Image (cartoon, coloured by chain):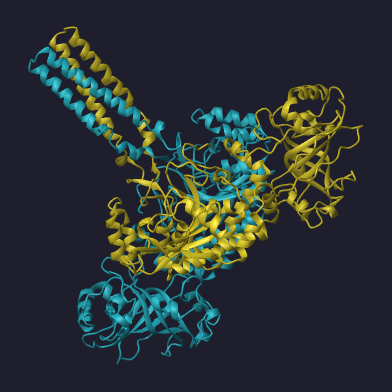
Chain colours: A yellow, B cyan
Amino acid sequence: MDSHGKTHQREHEDDVISPKPVALSKYSNRVELKTLLERSDGGARLAGKRVVIGGWVKSSRAVKKDSPPPPPPQPSVTVPPPPSTKSNISCTEIIQSKMNIFRKLFDVLSGGGKTTYPIFDKPEITGQKATSPPEYTIYFLISDGSSVSSLQVVVDSAMSTIPATQLMSLGTCIVAEGVLRHPLAASAKHVIELEAEKLLHVGTVDPEKYPLSKKQLPLHLLRDFSHFRPRTTTVGSVTRVHSALTLASHTFFQSNGFQYVQVPVITTTGFGEMFRVTTTLDREEKKHDGLSIETVKAAIKEKTRLIDHLKRSDSNREAVAAAVHDLKKTTDLAAQLEKKQKPQKLDFFGCDTYLTVSGRFHLESYASALGKVYTFGPRFTADKIDNARHLAEMWNVEAEIAFSELDDAMDCADDFFKFLCRYLLENRHEDMKFISKRVDKTVTTRLEATASNSLLRFSYTEAISLLQKATTRTFETKPKWGVALKEEHLSYLTDEICKGSVMIIHSYPKEVKPFYIRLNEDKKTVAAFDLVVPKVGVVISGSQNEERFEILDARIKELGSISREKYEWYLDLRRHGTVKHSGMSLRMEHMLLFATGLPDIKDAVPFPRSWGKANN
Amino acid sequence: MDSHGKTHQREHEDDVISPKPVALSKYSNRVELKTLLERSDGGARLAGKRVVIGGWVKSSRAVKKDSPPPPPPQPSVTVPPPPSTKSNISCTEIIQSKMNIFRKLFDVLSGGGKTTYPIFDKPEITGQKATSPPEYTIYFLISDGSSVSSLQVVVDSAMSTIPATQLMSLGTCIVAEGVLRHPLAASAKHVIELEAEKLLHVGTVDPEKYPLSKKQLPLHLLRDFSHFRPRTTTVGSVTRVHSALTLASHTFFQSNGFQYVQVPVITTTGFGEMFRVTTTLDREEKKHDGLSIETVKAAIKEKTRLIDHLKRSDSNREAVAAAVHDLKKTTDLAAQLEKKQKPQKLDFFGCDTYLTVSGRFHLESYASALGKVYTFGPRFTADKIDNARHLAEMWNVEAEIAFSELDDAMDCADDFFKFLCRYLLENRHEDMKFISKRVDKTVTTRLEATASNSLLRFSYTEAISLLQKATTRTFETKPKWGVALKEEHLSYLTDEICKGSVMIIHSYPKEVKPFYIRLNEDKKTVAAFDLVVPKVGVVISGSQNEERFEILDARIKELGSISREKYEWYLDLRRHGTVKHSGMSLRMEHMLLFATGLPDIKDAVPFPRSWGKANN
């Protein structure tokens, strides 16, 4: 890559070089493939342009130079059929079984030298060949992650000292300079390809250790390789959808007058199973005066054994007394060490701290000053659940609105949800098309239906009544007024009864929702809602939180389990200048499941954290 | 607030009601003050419009109905002068000394009943007065946090059963319906005010416990009240600036073709002082078979004392043996408890996990697949530092670019930094004007200069040479080639020599930068840069990270202290399809200090977390 930085400058400085390259990628000296392939003409009018491209090998095949060109692969990620002539090789074959034979063959053919790691920074220097091996034309499909599509790059094996087999391995990184041209083969379905003139960089792969394969592996097999799986077209697309949802969230709230507020991840408040944040654990493992607590414990054991032995062997009283005295000193030291290591006394913040489960408490403080606020950040629960819908670390978009009631938050959630759907349809067309093809055929129509239709709304009481009428399904938890709606209930409502997303609104029994939600006039129900989508469950939860000091205070007292002291600051917001307010929380990972149709949350998030699993 | 939701509907449904209200705030049934006050005519043409507004009292004064109207306060946050006539009262006076006298007086005057909390949801029901007290006209300045400006709201004390003193307290929340009018007093500087006809909601304040005051308190006095301080105009403005910087960051990267990647907060990799994430601590405190480790330790002590006593009192051998045997059982139990509680064995993820110090490692994985990626999230360090530039939890914007070298990341950082400055000038005009007035006079000119001029760039070696020539300053750490640039050096470079922001580029001694940064040809320096701004220090750090497997591997081995095993996944990125890449990291809180001129980071972040301090 050293050379192309110098010979090919940014477009606007580039009048001396002809033919003129198309727009370079900003902040990197190459053209993004999206720029070439996602044009309305598919890139046709770019033929003749000189470009530098970079990316990773998706598939490849080599053809002996005197052979006819193979049927060209389509500029997509589908596996091309294996070549018919024996003189042609494909990456697929190499990876699947014949690796060693082909590698040996090619090592011999191409001079056999062991290549260094990474190679080919300066081809003009390293390119001394002992003998002249037969030359191959290699057809690569290269992807750079800027879009779903891949570019066919045609490389002459003589351009590199690296054995062709190694170049051709799936996942090899290639930076090539060349000229765009229409494909030579008349049967080609792709519009444009690159005829490489120079390989500027090659980052090789060790195919025996590389976990990805040309075969479309089921996503769950890639979970242990979270650092490689974005190189698959599916995870690439899902990431671009995730990225779009993120910007769309900020755009929606800021264009509606909300201010972003950075709420803390480390907190002293919260409920349920939480993670502790501490600096005491590592200290415990450290030595004290050269003695660890483990050593001292071992000494106590040893010394007790000694006393036992002294007793049994009829030793004199002094020896026993001395041993007992010595033991006492050791147990004292143990106690002392124990005291010094008492975590609460030593911890970084001087108090118990946790990873936040929700940002809404902190947001309420800012809503009671700025009116409309939102945040977007990681939320944590330490529940020992390992299923397709739950992670220990998940990101929420949360909003809080002062001078508002439940209906306002419901309208906001409704608009936000539809905005996200519309945004994807408008801004991630290619990815949604690919995901529809590869993951879930109904995904685009689902987004379209959601964006253009009104969401069905009914109350908890109506939901229970609908569930009670269910004849085609029996539930583990019998639906009756007062029970929390479980996954089985929600999925029946969305998948079977409504065949779409629904909002369950207004009046939940107070026992099934958190203490801070506003008590309705009936004193039995609270002002909450849930937006539930098919196959996924709750995507947005919202509520009008209690603004009346006495009621909130009483409800905190009712829950003996939570430490009232920790909520004094939250109660303060009701003591001074209280206001009616409502808010909501969108679970980003669940939105992503809805938008992509992926069945498991572990495949939707780049680096999932779940019970018993944190990789990197 | 119950009533106005019904009588005043969203504007587009509102043709029946006359006069027509101006645009309501979306998702809350009131008009945001920004809509009224930040118009080009200052709101003049809105006179006669009926609106509902809500907000918190910034200042207030009451005038007896038969008195002439007081000189009207300006629609800003400056403290109005105390009224000259004794029959008029101002909020300032009440809060500062005469609270009890005035409260009593007003309680008597207004019927004296103790009001409930919160009050005035239904004025028509609660408005039965025993006697008719003298009536006051109360002039409020109300702010709703949507902008710097406040609205004057004129209220007749007879509208409410709440004592006027209580209504007038700083921080009281008021929702009022009324008609906009030009101010009556000819001397008024404000363009528009609201003549209230109904108070729809009042959220009172207990002034003796409320920490804010009409006096402009120094920000550091408010740090213990992080949940209230956004109600000050300064913190409100800083929050809106912070919000704008957040959206601007996403906009910059996405419009330049970067994909957002959600990197994890909980991680197994990292370096330096880190926070542990665990679920074992709470478990340790729990009992085991009814016995806590502390109880067992106490028993060991007691039993040892008993043996001692038995020995001294010449008891028979069997008694001593029995006691020793018993002690042994107890120490065994202690060992067993210890083992059961061994944190590593029990912890949630089955391994040691930490709060992330940087997202760049994880980003590199996605850059090696999608090309250009960025993220924005919380980063943590457990260093025991408590100063004006450091927090334990800070948010970074991080970016990583494949197919790029150091210069590309430098250009990206340069553009990003300028984009943020320009964005604030264009989108936060009123707030920047206020911050210039209240916090730092130079702030707007500084942003303008940064946005329009080229950043000065020089190398580490040049920086050292400039520092060595310094005659006006002696440094604690003498500047010579090889030392890390400390705060004293950076501030001298930016504040004294360059009088502006600088980029220190290209070649840092490898010893002063992390192990993963790319080694330059000279084998002595690494490819890094820092963007340093006056008074704040480093705002952006960037580097080209090592893409060569052998060199990275060797550098990890050099650092005996870090566990190589943890970095296997990171090394994998070089084993398979490696590529040159560079990236950067912007410290959002430091950008905010630069943009606002605030001297202390604890005042710039909503809920700061620092050594020994986590409030809520």
Expressed as whole percent of the image width and height from the top left, the position of residue B138 reads 33, 83
Is residue B499 left or right of A506 when viewed as pictured? right
Is residue A90 left or right of A517 when viewed as pictured? right
Which residue does the image show at 33% across and 25% down from the upper left?
A: A294
Q: Residue reaching furthest left? A: B313
Expressed as whole percent of the image width and height from the top left, the position of residue B588 reads 51, 54
Which quadrant of the figure has residue A318?
top left
Up-down relation of residue A411 to residue A231 (above or below): below
Up-down relation of residue A291 to residue A39 (above or below): above
Which residue does the image show at 26% across and 27% down from the upper left?
A: A334
Nearest the viewer among A38 and B452 is: A38
Up-down relation of residue A23 to residue A110 (above or below): below
Which residue does the image show at 49% across and 70% down from the upper left?
A: B27
Quarter of the rendering occupied by the N terminus of chain B: bottom left
Is residue A411 left or right of A444 when viewed as pictured? left
Q: Is residue B491 visible?
A: no
Is residue A301 left or right of B562 when viewed as pictured? left
